[in-house]
Image: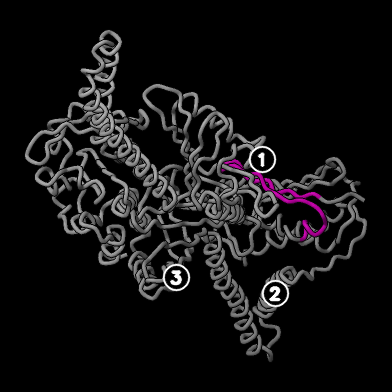
Amino acid sequence: MNLTDIKNTCHLYLQGEGEMAKLTREFDWSQTALGAPESWSQSLLTTVSIILNSKFPMFLWWGDDLIQFYNDAYRPSLGNNGKHPGALGQRGEECWPEIWPVIKPLIEQVMCGGGSTWREDQLIPIFRNNKLEDVYWTFSYSKVNDEYEKQGGVLVICSETTNKVNAIHQIEESYKEQHALNIQLIVTNAELSAANETLARINQELALSQEILRETVSELIESENRFRTLVRQAPVAIGVLKGSEYVIETANDKILEVWGKSHDIIGKPLEFALPELEGQPFLQLLNIVSTSGKPYYGKEVKAILIHNDEPKEFYFNVVYQPLQYQNEASNIIMVVAVDVTEQVLGRMSLEKATDMLRMSLNSSGIGSWNVEVLTDVILLSEEAQRIYGISAGTILTFHEVVEMTLQCDRARIRMAINEALDKKSTFSEEYQIKRLNDDAVRWVKAIGKPYYDEQGTLLTFLGTIYDVTDTKNQDQRKDDFINIASHELRTPITSLKMSLQLLDRMKDNPSHEMFPRLIKQSRNSVQKISLLVEDLLDFGRLQEGKLELSKSCFTLFELISTCCNSITIEGKQQVIIFGDKKLQVYADEHRIDEVITNLVNNAIKYAPSSKNILLTIEKENDRAKMCVLDAGPGISPDKIPYLFDRYYQADNFKSKSSGLGLGLYISAEIIKSHGGEIGVKSELGKGSTFWFTLPLK
């Protein structure tokens, strides 16, 4: 929202046709502790709007400096030559030095949570009309809360009762005089005739007093009518309950709408007017408020009310405010209620949907994020915090999270974010980050979208993020595999091509001494190509789920012996087999031969310093277990979890070995397709043990 929109919104709350509305709008508030209206809180704007549009005298102190506001109805109380209009925007202590010792404790009591105050016919002298006048007031001081538990203000709803009090004083004096006269009449009964003139004068004074009394009563009736008008026109639901039975004395249209009732219930006890309250806490709360004299504030209180002959569930923000005199128990309670059912149900539905989405995202490894536009704080889900390596409770801005992107990707990501904000579109990018807790570099993919209101103001910026490091590594291994496959196929093909070219030159001289060696070399090249092609074909079948098994019962020892006899062992390495020589399994003999050949060849290839390669056969529960042990250099613990992944090749002796990196992956898939298990145990410097299990006969 830009500055113009904020100003327009603020001035909507300061609208009004009266003098004080005009003065409030024109006043330079930036020179006060409150600052310009654009910086005012929602609570202050709403309270000022109510005051300026009310016909009942109202006065407001706000903030630590107790900056002042008042309306047209309060204006006459300041006199013609006094504090008006200087009182507007003035600090309370500067405006009321003559009565500050009286009213300051009342203000502090309300501001410090001591509850609202009520005073009737309270003498508070004020300076007006160029002099200090004795002025009587009936008033209530009520606390107005600000957002985020900040200091709010004190709302004064008041009425000057100086005329009423003076009239009552006159009546009391008149009654005293009349009483004295009555005593004199009893004592001086003989002098009645002489006192007729005095009695006539007294009668005139009584008539005058009665007239004053009638005027006072009329003012009281008018004051009550103004109060009822204020209640009736209030923008919130207000009702007044009286007596121990909580008779509904006053109820505006808003609260009748809330209750789902008509004006017929006015004058009836609450429990008869709303019988559905039985079993709900409201009558008990009213009893507590009436007895203690302390108000009750309820937020999102659940209530079951009858609307159109059907019980319905509602939620209200409610206030039970006792109206009491001094320390007497209150017999009048004002009820103020705001229907927040739609907001509560909407929030509950949103929270449920959010929780379900969060659980779904967390279970799938996807994190979510949401940027608070006003503060730039980014809210991260648990999974997003894990991805970024951020501890729970850590507060970061969106800018700080973007800075976690590696320098090589940061400019690109900033550009993508700015483009999404400018075009109001979605951005989707993959980039590298450095985790906050361990400085580990991870690949992530983030998808985000900004959301705007109808005026085009940015409301929020949210999206998802998930770790794609494994996918990136898998893609890299795939690329490496393609390069290795190309190299591994090119080498024997080149060798075969050269051998065939030489043989072609010697075809007329088959007795040449190189002829047999070239034929053997050609056969080795063809065999190597055949093995590579077979690995690729097996890999393709596994990918398509078309690996067929031809199972039969055979003795595992015999298969291992035959397999190892066909393996060419260079140097002094020996294959030693021991264990159960009669143990039979039910499996595809050809496929298991592939697995054994691969494991033994790997042991020979990656453990050249191991003199003996040990093969063991044993029965383990209802399965046969075979192990291939070598005394080679071992495998790093961080490599073990990936040994049976496709395309993966460990770094150990990589420069001395060849192959596609598919052998262990194919072996694992063959064993799994038999319902068996495969694994490895290894320790650096102490060799490795590869093992697998198969079902017995």
Relative vertical location of residue 237 with respect to residue 366 in this rendering, above or below: above
Residue at the left extreme of this rendering: 130
> How far, Cα to Cα, is label 2 from label 1?
86 Å
Q: Which mark is residue 30?
A: none
Q: Give residue 394's position: percent from left, percent from top.
A: 40, 44
Residue at the (63%, 57%) spot, across then down: 605
Is label 1 in contact with label 3 (beta carbons under 8 Å)?
Answer: no
For marks 3 and 2, the one nearer the N-term is 3
Neighbour tally class for label 2: few under 14, some 14-19, many 20 plus, Cα within 10 Å: some
> How far, Cα to Cα, is label 1 from label 3?
57 Å
The residue nearer to you, when weighing 251 against 511, is: 251
Label 1 residue SS:
helix
Tell me if residue 355 can be seen: no
- Residue placed under numbered mark 2 in the picture: 533
Q: Give residue 220's position: percent from left, percent from top.
A: 35, 39
Region rendered in magenta: 670-693
- Residue placed under numbered mark 3 in the picture: 427
* Drawn side of residue 246 relative to residue 506, left or right: left
Residue at the (32%, 47%) spot, across then down: 56
- Residue placed under numbered mark 1 in the picture: 275
Q: Give residue 506's position: percent from left, percent from top.
A: 65, 88
> How far, Cα to Cα, is label 3 from label 2?
43 Å
Give the foreground label among 3 and 2: 3
Relative vertical location of residue 680 with respect to residue 665 in this rendering, above or below: above
For marks 1 and 3, the one nearer the N-term is 1
Label 3 residue SS:
strand
* Drawn side of residue 373 relative to residue 249, left or right: left
